Amino acid sequence: MMKFTRPFHGIILILFVMLAINSTSATTKYNVLSFGAKPNGKTDSTKAFLMAWEAACSSSDSTMIYVPKGRYLLGSMAFKGGCKSPQITIRIDGTLVAPQDYRVLGKSTDWLKFEGVNGVSILGGALDAKGPSLWACKASHSNCPSGATTLSFTNSKNIRIRRLLSLNSQMFHIVINGCENVHVQGVRIIAAGDSPNTDGIHVQLSKNVNIIKCSIKTGDDCISIGPGTKNLWVEQVTCGPGHGISIGSLAKDLKEEGVQNVTIRKTTFMGTQNGLRIKSWARPSTGFVQGVRFLDSLMKNVQNPIVIDQNYCPHNLNCPNQVSGIKIKDIIYEGIRGTSSTQVAIKFDCSPKNPCTGIRLQNVNLSYLNKPAQSSCSNVHGKALNLVRPETINSTSALTKYNVLNFGAKPNGKTDSTKAFLMAWKAACASADSTIIYVPKGRYLLGSMAFQGGCKSPQIIFRIDGTLVAPQDYRVLGKSTDWLSFEGVNGVSILGGALDAKGPSLWACKASHSNCPSGATTLSFTNSKNIKIHSLLSLNSQMFHIVINGCENVNVQGVRIIAAGNSPNTDGIHVQLSKNVNIIKCSIKTGDDCISIGPGTKNLWVEQVTCGPGHGISIGSLAKDLKEEGVQNITVKKTIFLGTQNGLRIKSWARPSTGFVQGIRFMDSLMVNVQNPIVIDQNYCPHNLNCPNQVSGIKIKDIIYEGIRGTSSTQVAIKFDCSPRNPCTGIRLQNINLSYLNKPAQSSCSNVRGKALNLVQPETINSTSALTKYNVLNFGAKPNGKTDSTKAFLMAWKAACASADSTIIYVPKGRYLLGSMAFQGGCKSPQIIFRINGTLVAPQDYRVLGKSTDWLSFEGVNGVSILGGALDAKGPSLWACKASHSNCPSGATTLSFTNSKNIRIHSLLSLNSQMFHIVINGCENVNVQGVRIIAAGDSPTPMASMSNYLRIIGSLAKDLKEEGVQNITVKKTIFLGTQNGLRIKSWARPSTGFVQGVRFMDSLMVNVQNPIVIDQNYCPHNLNCPNQVSGIKIKDIIYENIRGTSSTQVAIKFDCSSKNPCTEIRLQNVNLSYLNKSAQSSCSNVRGKALNLVRPESCL
């Protein structure tokens, strides 16, 4: 038999997690009742708990301190570290209660304190600190103690706090100070909204802390983040009442560590004083805040949803006349939405000495009394992307204003206000302050205007509440290049309003073929930086509506462009020689390209744009000039095309050029009755002038089309007409579904190289319509299922292989009897497609194939595709022979590819293989999609009779010298009654092999025997491996979003090598049950961590 490691049996499916890694089932237990604790809530059990801790701590085993149901009266306790036990779990089914007299704890710093511990977990239970009596004392302004923190961890590592309820703390509920690797999940914190200084969770001087799925109701910060915090992850936290989530107060001390790499996401704030806050004293400090991400937060009636306050100075003590030294940079607010209970929803009050920088707001929508809220900004630099309400980052409320009416503008639409607008610009430009030019409601008649740069003002905002109108006579503007042009400006924003260019009269002139001027662009920016155009309406431009030429950092958002579908050359937005341009949430209806992208454009992002009528979104025309800059790093996503001439187009003249197009991503687009949904045209030569008999020099490569769907109004939905001298390369199509008249559309491809992944309709990249076809019937094949057609198929292969063209071997409907066949490589044809509409059947007598290694084998081939059809290997008769323990042949693999490249197997059905169904051995670039494999659950494999199982990785370590397995992703899989789910398996033998970089993601298990398993001690029948250990090194394995049911009690089993323990194993969002209860896990020689919900409980 052929020697190779067979990577899978059948087809790969996949994944679900429920882990424990040294779970509590293997731990030594200490019940506090055995040490004298009393669950009556009256007898002091402090000593009993400390004795239980001492016993657990001194054990060399993993241990559990168990607290049964009941109420346990406890005084202040310190649990010291230096333990022998590698893991101590405190399992609480009862409630720990503080003394009724607040003075007993009040002068202590902490009630329950852990110092210098490692591997401690607190699971379940409640802590009732009896805080209200101390709060009442403080409210009366009596002489009261400060109060104690309920639970604190100091200088500790690998801590878990899960499903704990903390009630009525005297001071802070939970403090994490100087710790590393802390996971807080499912915790509830409750205290009155007016309880003083009862912060929910305080983190400082700590790293790698996760706070997940917690509910916090308290009288101070729900979560407070102090100096020296880094790598903090907060997710799915509900806050309220309380003071919100706060970074700070900072700058209490001159020398202070910074706060960095903090992520707060999926949070809800209900009636809180603040939402997301960064706060520092107005004092000198060496501290900083950077790399903070506030994502996806809902505000419900919050006083200050977003706030940075660097001028905190209560009672004006110890800080008057000073400024904060804290440096704040790289802060992102994204997806923040909801309602503010005050008019100012966003307040950035940063240090005048150290302004906040790199502040980014994206998709922020906050309202006040059902209207847009306001913002207040001081000493802050950043940018706003997509929809941001209220307007932010140096918003208009703080700017010096220039009202055009004060310069003589008339809002009657008749009086020429050109001079007044230019005077307002001159005044704003000359100011040293940030300025706003305000255009009130009304219609303002304007001629051609050039707003020149070189301004002193760092920011000039045109706030337009009215409409700017062009002269009625198209000739006034017609000979100008632009109507409103900005040249060499920096920091200019145009917010709101409408521009009516009165274009229809010029379009009519052109339609009549009269002697007409070219017409003016409505709005242009040239050689400018840091430009915003938001919520503008551009109507009926004479030529282009908006041009961005030679610019940097431009944000176009919420713009609407309207012109007739037959208006000539009225491109919506044209970009060229520019970088870092965003075009977001725009609607463009025009007579030419909705967006046209010219030479020299790089780092362009287009998202949520609706186009139609119009000519689509086009890169080009390019190659107008011999020396031309390239177009690169363009992303166009979430776009809609309605009845347009083109959808996504790349176009170049058929002329020499040094230009190029590369790094383009067209993603998630909907086509509705579009003539040419996807098109590359490198042979553009209108009227056959200046380009006949030439070819385009533009080099096009690395273009991705993904998630393009909808309808074409023509039969050819995809057309790649590339340059014969410079073919398009690196073209990738993925998840494309385009139809024509409710049927699959067609494609046309010339001089293009690439690949298609997942579903792609119509078939593309040298699709079958353009291939030389070889019908097996023409070589003598008989579709009756009785006549041997082996020779006919081999003859068809030989003909296709010898052709210099791309070819297709076509198998019509019917059943074709075939013996063992080997299709050898070394072909001239760059692409051979087997298009199978029938069924290939093996001989009825299993012995005909049984002694062969393979039934259909491909060796050393390149560019072979198998599309559709069925393979019936007639395996049951051989299985029955093996079941009878007779002398039977091993059996043949149905389909194998060996030492081959660029292989596709799509929509194939493999039935009843004698041995393996599909084997891929020594191959590169293989895509298997839409394949179905069917065999009986008790059909035998060459490794013993294992029913209904899926083997993912392994068996490994068969040989001493063995290559590794790396960079494997298994996602969105379903396992139905299988023996295993996601398995890594190696023999217990020495080996140089390894497994690393494996991702098991989003898998559903339905009644699976072993959902998650690593087995490094495989040694069947105890042969060739007793008393040995596996040399396979396993690391960096992720199990994420694995869910479902196990048919055995142990759902997760990690049995790793004692010589080479598994490392960097990560479980995240794993939920596996057994008989509607939590399953168990078994773990040996494994190291890693568990994030978010993981069931069963994990020691990671």
Image: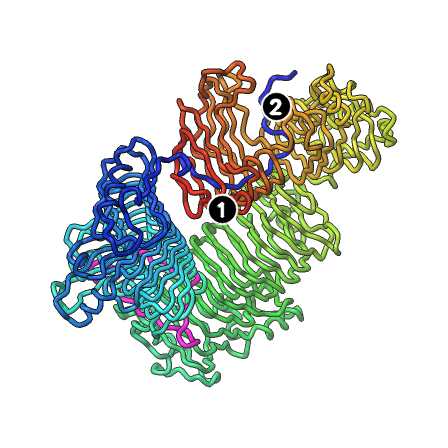
Question: Where in the figure is residue 782, as x and y percent of width and height?
Answer: 87, 29
Q: Is residue 76 left or right of residue 547?
A: left
Q: Is residue 650 left or right of residue 436?
A: right
Kind of residue at disc 2? Asn
Query: Any mark on residue 357, and which?
Result: none
Element type where label 2 sits in the image: loop
Q: Is residue 1029 left or right of residue 381?
A: right
Element type where label 1 sits in the image: loop
The correct choice, above or below, for 973 with respect to 912 in the image is below
| Residue 188 visible in the picture | yes
The correct choice, above or below, for 786 with respect to 112 in the image is above
The residue at the point 34 percent across, 42 percent down is: 89
Query: How many C-alpha atoms fall within 10 Å of the one at disc 2: few (<14), some, or many (≥20)?
Result: some
Question: Where in the figure is residue 1057, as x and y percent of width and height?
Answer: 43, 24
- Please tell me whether residue 1 belongs to the stretch shown in magenta: no
The correct choice, above or below, for 598 with respect to 964 in the image is below
Question: Where in the figure is residue 810, as x and y percent of width and height?
Answer: 78, 34
Q: Of residues 530 and 838, which is closer to you in this image?
A: 838
Kind of residue at disc 1? Gly
Q: Of residues 445 and 436, which is closer to you in this image?
A: 436
Q: Is residue 653 left or right of residue 114?
A: right
- Please tell me whether residue 376 belongs to the stretch shown in magenta: yes
* Residue bearing mark 2: 899
Q: Which residues are magenta?
A: 351-380
Q: CA distance from mark 2 to mark 1?
A: 38 Å
Q: Earlier in the sequence, mark 2 or mark 1?
A: 1
The residue at the point 57 percent across, 72 percent down is: 503
Q: Quadrant of the N terminus?
A: top right
| Residue 698 visible in the picture | no
* Residue bearing mark 1: 630
Query: How many C-alpha atoms fall within 10 Å of the one at disc 1: few (<14), some, or many (≥20)?
Result: many
Q: Quadrant of the C terminus?
A: top left
